[in-house]
Amino acid sequence: MNLSQLKNAFRVFAVGTMMVVTPFAAQAGRLLVGDFNGDESGVKAYDGTTGASQGTFVPFNSGGLTFPLGGAIGPDHNLYVSNSNNETVLRYNGATGAFLNIFVPEVDDPAALIFRSGFLYVASSSDPGSVSRFNATTGAFVDTFVAPGSGGLIDPEGMVFGPDGNLYVTNGSSVLRYNGTTGAFIDAFVAPNSGGLVNTRGLAFAPDGNLLVGNFNFGGGGILEYNGTTGAFVGSFVPAGSGGLSSPRPLIFGPDGNLYVGDYGNGSVLRYNGTTGAFINQFVPPGSGGLLGPTFLVFQSSTVPDSSSALSLLAISLAALGFARLAGAHFSRSV
């Protein structure tokens, strides 16, 4: 092989390496579930399509984790978990679950986490309750977005930004609404005890724009539906006891458009039709993988880049390109 052939061969290798090969640490989508379960507390992993257990993703006490109350996937594809007992937000490798660092070293009783527009929003489930903002890249404190006790806020565990861009926060037997830009209190969007709401921890906006709220009630709670514009009670989206539902805590719509509910009373994740609320199946059966008390649900993308592998591959590719250019330069001088 002459130098021209060698040069072309390495060019093909380098370009093919960068354009064709894409490393991923996880090829199947996952459902990550926060589990409050004594010395077994942590984050459990399940197949995002079948619900089959994939074992423990983040074990008890990893990075000091003892009470995982909220979770979110960050813009860096890593997993962020609110550690309520130790008042921190912890970061874990999104591909392996390995502890990376204490992302937020101090925040009062952290619960729900939301990444949005360069910020990490953290609900403090204390009395009075509040919502703080942190830099989504560094974890540095930015400001108190919702002031302590604003609008009567107590023990907020769940929150979501609505279609109108405003922030909706659980507040016992009601849901409060705050300006999505300033954090100023707007109103009690869902009035106390509306539709029989006793205590809520989880909420989600449905594809049709209505608000779904879990009625966290060990006596048998269901999922209540409210008009997404007025907050008026619409009806029971998922009746109490449907599919064995006892105490709905986290709610999330999955990539299939269906509603997934963490049943804190039975240690399971139930799936319901995202349009009608009809029961589909026990996506994660009671106790599967050791699950006892689901606190948050996070669907992880089916393609989670392994940053270390990606960097290694990029280095190899750049080296190959460099060799090809060097070979080309040598060949030019030779002729």
Image (spheres, grey):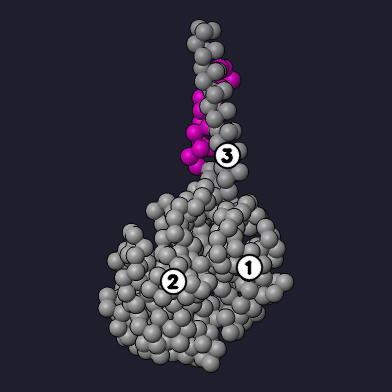
Judged left or right of residue 302, residue 167 is left
Rendering coords of residue 262 (x, y %): 53, 77
State the SS at label 2: loop
| Viewer-nearest of discs 2 and 3 | 2
- Please say if the residues under marks 2 and 3 sit with CB atoms less than 8 Å apart: no
Q: Is residue 307 above or below residue 190?
A: above
Judged left or right of residue 206, residue 126 is right
Amino acid of disc 2: Gly
Residue occupying image coordinates x 55% and y 64%: 108
Residue occupying image coordinates x 46% and y 81%: 172
Q: Which residues are magenta?
A: 1-20
Foreground: 158 or 148?
A: 148
| Viewer-nearest of discs 1 and 3 | 1
- Please say if the residues under marks 2 and 1 sit with CB atoms less than 8 Å apart: no
Query: For mark 2, does the 10 Å Cα neighbourhood hold few (<14), some (14 to 19), or many (20 or more) residues?
Result: some
What residue is pinned by disc 2? 149
Q: Which mark is residue 112?
A: none
What residue is pinned by disc 1? 85
In the displayed orientation, state which residue is furthest to the right. Answer: 39
- Residue 15 colored in magenta in the image: yes
**Figure quadrant of residue 267:** bottom right
What residue is pinned by disc 3? 311
Rendering coords of residue 211 (x, y %): 36, 76
Closer to the N terminus: mark 2 or mark 1?
A: 1
Closer to the N terminus: mark 2 or mark 3?
A: 2
Q: Is residue 221 visible?
A: yes
